[in-house]
């Protein structure tokens, strides 16, 4: 199947987000769509699949003009769209999610063949290297597992074209490898892919072609083998961004700010002991599912612990809920911006000042003027792509939502900031801004803990790295001795 998008333009109110964009997908190719946060990638794919209607331009499928009215029509044509925001229903089982809209029934009785569907589901998932019970509620699975269900859905439909919008943002390395071998296999059968990702290494590993958008404009289409990392970044950003990681000028560390002793939550993590100093950036590496997020959540009071101690500034403290943690000077940027980080129906401004209001309203009144100037400063500093601060967060692009989460916690000016996968879904330029911001904070004496599954990132930004392996501390590595190999070794327990 060949898909051509020609001259596509789209505006939301007065904001034109696509300007006469062209994009062609040939059968059997893996075609990356790249561009900064807010460049228009997701919008273009939503136009192709009829979620939005273009203001001008044409969608041609095998040369024939097409305009889809609903998801069903798209599926019938053999096109599957795995959205950036997952479309999993948490209160339905895994099998119900997989068969949604295509339930198998006994004759015309309307009685569902639940057992059969569950069995088939487990078969599909096993094919993806995933063993989960099909009768489990989808909401109880990890984000990565939910992502794999979305992929299984596309396979079940035997789609000829699969659009993946940030498919690997929440996957483990193992799941990513499974996904890539699957893509290779399907490609040989003529299936084509639109692949959207901010992870450069992946693009160069799995894609054949790259089309680049910048500010809603078509820039170029390149064969992956004929281009380079730097060229792609240049085309995306419109300038060279220099090194990927800012140089860390000799940082000054002083006293220990946070110390954790023998923290245990049975079934999740055991005997976790570590400290972080004021001015230090402590990276936390490990495989996905190793328990890193649970540990951080427990420290912050989102989850309870069975035993262990938390010390702050030399005093033992008791943190039972997040507001306790905030009182002791901790800030926490969660990995799951959708359920914990943001209120999607609120504006950028409301989201950014939310924690400040909640915690300090009783202590002092923040003037609207100060609030506004803080919000403007953050929009500028993090380069958030928006028409203005009253725009609803749900209408921002995925990466720009992540930046709002970040801004929100920076406003609290914590003494210790915990960041869980802060750059997930964020474009290269903004990643560097976030790294610089972390360094700036550290230089001001803030203790920083950053959980990241992106190995080059942990190596690039940390002063010291703690590796978590199966709920235990696998070891610590200093910046000067840190290598990817060493960390993977500790993360897998030498396996
Ligand atoms: N429903 C909407 N209403 C108003 N503006 C929107 C809507 N959807 C998208 N936009 C705007 O369109 C622009 C392009 O957004 P889009 O989601 O396509 O970006 P993207 O390239 O997918 O970015 P990311 O890499 O962050 O996912 C952004 O400025 C965004 O704020
Ligand atoms: Mg997007």
Image: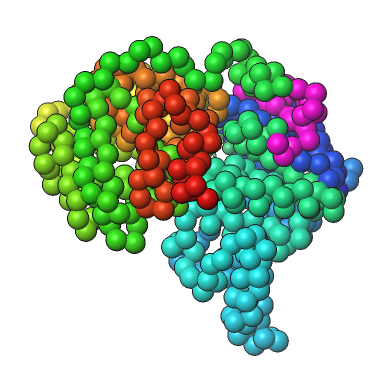
Residue at 71% x, 22% y: name it. 228
**Location of residue 93 in the rendering, given as x and y in whole percent from the top left corner:** 51, 70
The one of 234 and 67 positioned closer to us in this rendering: 234
Q: In this view, does 437 lie to the left or right of 219?
A: left
**Residue at (24, 24) in percent of width and height:** 278
Residue 332 is at least partly visible in this image: yes
Tell me: residue 71, above or below residue 196.
below
**Residue 56 sits inside the magenta stretch:** no
Residue placed most toward the observer, 280 or 304: 280
- Residue at horizontal 61 percent and vertical 47 percent from the top: 176
The span shown in magenta is: 205-227
Residue 495: x and y, percent?
Answer: 52, 50
Res 397 seen here: no
Q: Which of 96 and 364 is in front in this view?
A: 96
Which quarter of the picture shows residue 151?
bottom right
256 sits to left or right of 54: left
In the displayed structure image, the side of residue 183 where residue 312 appears, left or right: left
Question: What residue is at 78 percent from the left and 35 percent from the top?
Answer: 208
Q: Which residue lies furthest to the right in this view?
A: 63
Q: Is residue 217 magenta?
A: yes
Q: Quadrant of residue 119?
A: bottom right
Q: Residue 60: x and y, percent?
A: 83, 42
- 160 w.r.t. 202: above or below: below
Q: Where is residue 155 in the image (x, y as percent from the top left)?
A: 71, 59
323 is higher (above) or lower (below) than 153: above
For ligand 1, which image quadrant applies?
A: top right
């Amino acid at each position: 199947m060949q898909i051509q998008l020609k001259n596509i333009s789209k505006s939301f109110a007065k904001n034109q987000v696509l300007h006469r964009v062209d994009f062609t997908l040939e059968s059997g190719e893996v075609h990356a769509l790249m561009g900064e946060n807010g460049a228009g990638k997701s919008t273009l794919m939503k136009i192709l699949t009829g979620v939005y209607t273009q203001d001008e331009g044409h969608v041609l499928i095998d040369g024939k003009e097409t305009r889809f009215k609903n998801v069903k029509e798209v599926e019938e044509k053999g096109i599957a769209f795995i959205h950036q925001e997952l479309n999993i229903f948490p209160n339905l089982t895994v099998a119900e999610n997989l068969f949604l809209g295509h339930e198998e029934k006994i004759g015309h009785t309307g009685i569902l063949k639940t057992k059969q569907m569950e069995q088939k589901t487990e078969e599909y998932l096993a094919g993806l290297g995933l063993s989960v019970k099909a009768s489990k509620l989808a909401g109880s699975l990890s984000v990565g597992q939910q992502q794999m269900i979305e992929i299984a859905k596309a396979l079940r439909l035997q789609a000829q074209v699969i659009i993946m919008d940030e498919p690997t943002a929440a996957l483990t390395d193992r799941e990513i490898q499974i996904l890539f071998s699957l893509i290779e296999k399907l490609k040989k059968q003529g299936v084509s892919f639109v692949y959207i990702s901010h992870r450069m290494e992946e693009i160069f590993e799995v894609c054949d072609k790259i089309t680049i958008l910048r500010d809603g404009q078509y820039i170029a289409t390149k064969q992956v083998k004929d281009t380079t990392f730097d060229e792609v970044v240049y085309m995306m950003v419109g300038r060279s961004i220099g090194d990927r990681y800012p140089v860390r000028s000799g940082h000054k560390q002083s006293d220990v700010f946070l110390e954790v002793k023998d923290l245990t939550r049975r079934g999740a993590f055991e005997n976790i002991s570590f400290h972080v100093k004021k001015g230090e950036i402590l990276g936390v590496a490990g495989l996905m599912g190793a328990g890193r997020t649970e540990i951080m959540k427990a420290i912050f009071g989102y989850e309870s612990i069975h035993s262990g101690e938390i010390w702050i500034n030399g005093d033992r403290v008791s943190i039972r809920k997040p507001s306790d943690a905030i009182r002791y000077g901790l800030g926490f940027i969660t990995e799951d911006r959708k359920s914990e980080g943001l209120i999607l129906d609120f504006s950028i401004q409301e989201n950014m000042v939310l924690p400040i209001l909640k915690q300090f309203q009783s202590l002092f009144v923040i003037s609207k003027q100060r609030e506004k100037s803080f919000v403007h400063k953050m929009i500028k500093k993090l380069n958030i792509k928006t028409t203005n601060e009253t725009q609803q967060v749900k209408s921002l692009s995925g990466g720009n939502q992540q930046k709002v989460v970040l801004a929100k916690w920076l406003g609290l000016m914590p003494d210790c900031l915990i960041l869980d996968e802060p750059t997930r879904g964020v474009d290269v330029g903004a990643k560097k801004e976030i790294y610089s911001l972390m360094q700036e904070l550290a230089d001001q004496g803030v203790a920083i803990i950053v959980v990241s599954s992106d190995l080059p990132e942990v190596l690039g930004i940390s002063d010291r790295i703690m590796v978590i392996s199966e709920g235990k501390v696998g070891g610590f590595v200093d910046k000067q001795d840190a290598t990817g190999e060493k960390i993977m070794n500790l993360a897998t327990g030498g396996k």
